[in-house]
Image (tube, rainbow, N blue to C red):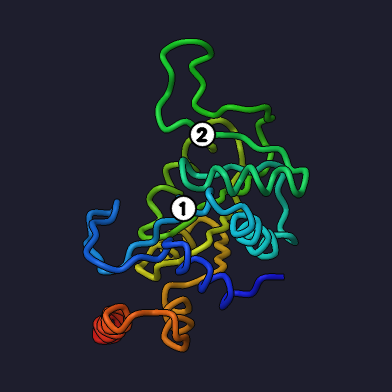
């Protein structure tokens, strides 16, 4: 079983943890960017990610899976196939043709749906997804995420759901700082980021 440290290293090595100057979806700027779209090109890492996330929720009760579009969809599909749990899919926009459904798949109102997400920043994408699932009659108790950026999103979500996370940004940084694989510039960025966090 892959542990948090080895997964953190693997994500860094494929460029899923990047350093520089980035604007996040939330509008915030950050010197660290988590780009988990890259995991789809590395099947073993995708399997490891899914296995670690499943381990967090295996004792939870749910009937369906739904990945937040788009990055979490491959994770949700992997989890569905590996554990034989049906999946539904939320469209980002409703079609104005065909069935015009926002939630695709076969489900029954009242079923419990586990939401799967790659990264929490503010939690906004999860809240939007949960709202559409609830409008379709589904029940949301649990959310599982790969990385919690520790920027208040978890606290926002915990007002409504039980949140399970595999990694935190600070945990990833601790692993990288104790390794020899990062550059001096990256080490400086991480140390500055930690110092700024601790002073707020």
Vertical placement of 187 versus 29: above or below? below
Residue 53: name its quadrant: bottom right
Q: CA distance from mark 1 to mark 2?
A: 21 Å
**Could you tell me how many numbered marks the image carries?**
2
Query: Relative to 46, is 185 on the left or the right?
Result: left
Give residue 67's position: percent from left, percent from top.
Answer: 55, 44
Q: Nearer the viewer, residue 70 or 13?
A: 13
Q: Earlier in the sequence, mark 1 or mark 2?
A: 1
In terms of depth relative to the viewer, which is nearer, 14 or 147?
Answer: 14
Answer whether labels 1 and 2 touch (C-beta < 8 Å): no
Residue 82, given in percent of the width and then of the height, sits at 75, 48
Residue under the point 30% across and 84% down:
184
- For image coordinates 49% across by 26% down, the residue present is 102
Mark 1 lies on residue? 38
69 w.r.t. 166: above or below: above
- The N terminus - image quarter: bottom right
Q: Which dot marks residue 90?
A: 2
Give the crowd class for mark 1: few <14, some 14-19, many >=20 residues within 10 Å. Answer: some
The C terminus, quarter of image: bottom left
Q: Which mark is residue 142?
A: none
Q: Secondary structure at mark 2?
A: strand
């Amino acid at each position: 079983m892959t542990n948090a440290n080895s997964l953190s290293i693997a994500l860094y090595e494929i460029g899923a943890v990047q350093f520089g100057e980035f604007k996040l979806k939330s509008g915030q700027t950050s010197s660290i960017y988590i780009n988990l779209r890259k995991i789809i090109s590395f099947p073993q890492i995708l399997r490891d990610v899914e296995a670690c996330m499943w381990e967090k929720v295996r004792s939870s009760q749910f009937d369906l899976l739904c990945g937040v579009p788009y990055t979490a969809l491959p994770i949700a599909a992997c989890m569905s196939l590996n554990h034989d749990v049906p999946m539904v899919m939320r469209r980002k926009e409703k079609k104005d043709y065909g069935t015009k459904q926002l939630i695709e798949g076969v489900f029954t109102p009242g079923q419990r749906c586990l939401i799967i997400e790659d990264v929490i920043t503010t939690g906004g994408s999860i809240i939007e997804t949960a709202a559409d699932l609830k409008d379709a009659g589904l029940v949301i108790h649990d959310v599982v995420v790969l990385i919690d950026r520790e920027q208040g999103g978890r606290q926002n979500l915990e007002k409504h759901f039980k949140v399970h996370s595999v990694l935190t940004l600070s945990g990833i940084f601790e692993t990288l700082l104790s390794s020899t694989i990062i550059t001096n510039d990256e080490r400086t960025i991480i140390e500055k980021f930690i110092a700024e966090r601790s002073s707020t």
